[in-house]
């Protein structure tokens, strides 16, 4: 059991050495895209919610 755990962590270390981390500029760009997308989705959801609310107020 102990050998399997050690082998697992050895494999993790080997794989982490293969990782290419993003540069600061790439990270900023990706973060901006995620924030803008979330804001657009929130605005879209808000507008749809207001429309549905008005429809139900008109019905009832």
Image: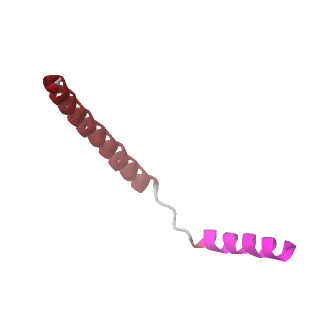
The residue lying toward the viewer, choosing from 1 and 7, is: 1
Question: Could you tell me which residue is drawn at 79 percent across and 71 percent down?
Answer: 5
In this view, the residue in front, 51 or 19, is 51
Q: Position of residue 52 (x, y in %)?
A: 20, 33
Residue with the most extreme front position: 60
The percent coordinates of residue 18 (x first, y second) are 58, 73
Residue at 36% x, 43% y is 35
Q: Which residues are magenta?
A: 1-17
**Which quadrant: the C terminus?**
top left
Q: Is residue 39 left or right of residue 8?
A: left
Q: Reply yes or no: does residue 8 show up in magenta.
A: yes
User: In x, y percent, where is residue 17?
Assistant: 62, 71
Residue lying farthest right?
Answer: 2
| Relative side of 10 to 19, left or right | right
Residue 16 drawn at (x, y percent): 62, 68
Q: What residue is at 13 percent from the left and 24 percent from the top?
A: 58
For the N terminus, the quadrant is bottom right
Residue 25 lies, with reference to residue 2, above or below; the image says above
Relative height, residue 54 to residue 31 (above, below): above
| Image coloring type | secondary structure
Identity of the residue furthest to the left in this view: 58
Residue 24 vs residue 45, the one in the foreground: 45
**Residue 7 in magenta stretch:** yes
From the image, give the main secondary structure of the stretch colored magenta: helix
Quarter of the rendering containing residue 12 = bottom right
């Amino acid at each position: 059991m102990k050998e399997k755990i050690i082998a697992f962590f050895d494999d993790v270390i080997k794989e982490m050495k293969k990782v290419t981390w993003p540069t600061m500029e790439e990270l900023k760009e990706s973060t901006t895209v995620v924030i803008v997308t979330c804001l657009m989705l929130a605005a879209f959801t808000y507008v749809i919610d207001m429309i549905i609310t008005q429809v139900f107020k008109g019905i009832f």
